[in-house]
Image: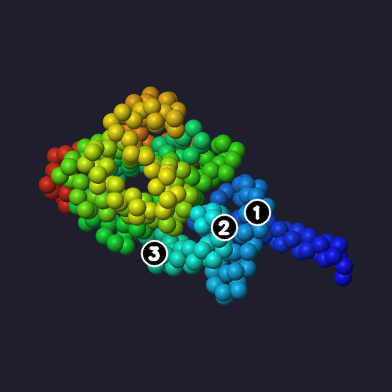
Amino acid sequence: MNEKDEDQTQNKIKKSQTSVIINQNKQENNSLIINNPINHSNTINTSNSISEKEIQKLIELKEYCAMNALEYRFDLYNNEMLLRILRSRKYNIQESYKAFVDFINFTRQYDFFNLHKVKFPNFDKIRLFYPHGFHKTSVDGYPVFIQMLGELKISDINRLLPEPLLTQYILYKIVEVEKEIFPKCSEKFHKNINKVFCVVDLLGLSTSLMNKQIMDFVNKLISVCSKYYPGIMDALYFVNTSLVFRSIWAPCKYLYEYETRERIKLLGFDYKEELLKKIKYENLPKFFGGLCNCSPYGCIFSNVGPWNEKVSEGEKRRNTNYLEKIKNLKEERGNKEDDDDDLDLDE
């Protein structure tokens, strides 16, 4: 065989491999609709949003997995997951393989693909003691996740969510993002949305409360996302940060990889202009200096966004009942600050 024939043969092999990965990706998307609780909508074709280089790297990683006899179900660990890992490891196949093995072990440890069956005791109380929620989108189309860390009742959260429940709850929110929120945002903005813009408000977090438990909680939230879902965080802005928090944060930030650290910003009490670079004025909550004032329950509990625009009347009633419950719990919490166990949370 001459050199020209060899080149032609190699080109045919490459085209064949590329075809296989694209076809497999389509099969994965179709099968994941039934089997995987975190699939993207089948209207989003991952193969159209990645380069030829990334397709080739996906092939290499899967071949390397096969060569090492790694057993995994491609209908659960889809191409989007593998791409996150490849990108975070700068397409180094050996490093990506190691990270993928760690990820598989992690998901098995916390029964990730059965999280929809996990029952979190006192589910409503979690958001009462740790106010958080999704609220509209950033200028790039990414869902905005707001956490009011200054209102965090860490002792109550530790009681309600002892490990492994805390990690499972964090993963539960990731499932919610990937199953419900990303697909709707992708559909709305006609592009592949696979990141979240996070805002953490520290207003009300006093120096006396800024202890190891608080920092462990913050580190847990960030580390799960950065280690096992690299690239899922577009950016993380801490607002209303005090000098004390900055001094405590300085050594903690080195727990994360460089790419994660670069996505995190510490903003003081004059943060409005920075937030407006990421969130439109009309979408920014009033408590951050914007125009939005979701009523009657407030932006933090509203869950307003593309993922919630076309919901059934039954779903609306369930959301309303849930928010009413949160409101009543907050009122009872104010009246019974030292007697949380008396709150009736049964349906």
Residue at position x 39%, y 67% from top? Answer: 109
- Asked whether disc 2 touches disc 1, contact meaning CB atoms under 8 Å apart, the reply is yes
Q: Earlier in the sequence, mark 3 or mark 1?
A: 1
Image location of residue 193, percent across then percent down = 53, 43
The residue that mark 3 highlights is 110
The residue that mark 1 highlights is 53
Q: Residue furthest left?
A: 338
Q: Residue furthest bottom?
A: 69
Check disc 3: other Cα within 10 Å, few if <14, some if 14-19, many if 20+.
some
Residue at position x 13%, y 48% from top? Answer: 339
Q: Quadrant where the N terminus lies?
A: bottom right
The residue lying toward the viewer, choosing from 102 and 126, is 102
The residue lying toward the viewer, choosing from 85 and 92, is 92
Label 3, secondary structure: give it. loop
Label 2, secondary structure: give it. loop
User: What residue type is disc 1 on?
Assistant: Lys
Question: Which mark lies nearer to you, 2 or 3?
Answer: 2
Left or right, 18 with respect to 250, comes to right
- Asked whether disc 3 touches disc 1, contact meaning CB atoms under 8 Å apart, the reply is no
User: What residue type is disc 2 on?
Assistant: Tyr
212 over 69 or under it: above or below: above
Check disc 2: other Cα within 10 Å, few if <14, some if 14-19, many if 20+.
some
Check disc 1: other Cα within 10 Å, few if <14, some if 14-19, many if 20+.
few
- The colour scheme is rainbow
233 over 61 or under it: above or below: above
Image location of residue 244, percent across then percent down = 21, 41
In 3D space, how far apart are the residues under numbered discs 2 and 1 (Cα atoms)?
Answer: 10 Å
Residue at position x 21%, y 53% from top? Answer: 212
In 3D space, how far apart are the residues under numbered discs 2 and 3 (Cα atoms)?
Answer: 27 Å
User: What residue type is disc 3 on?
Assistant: Tyr
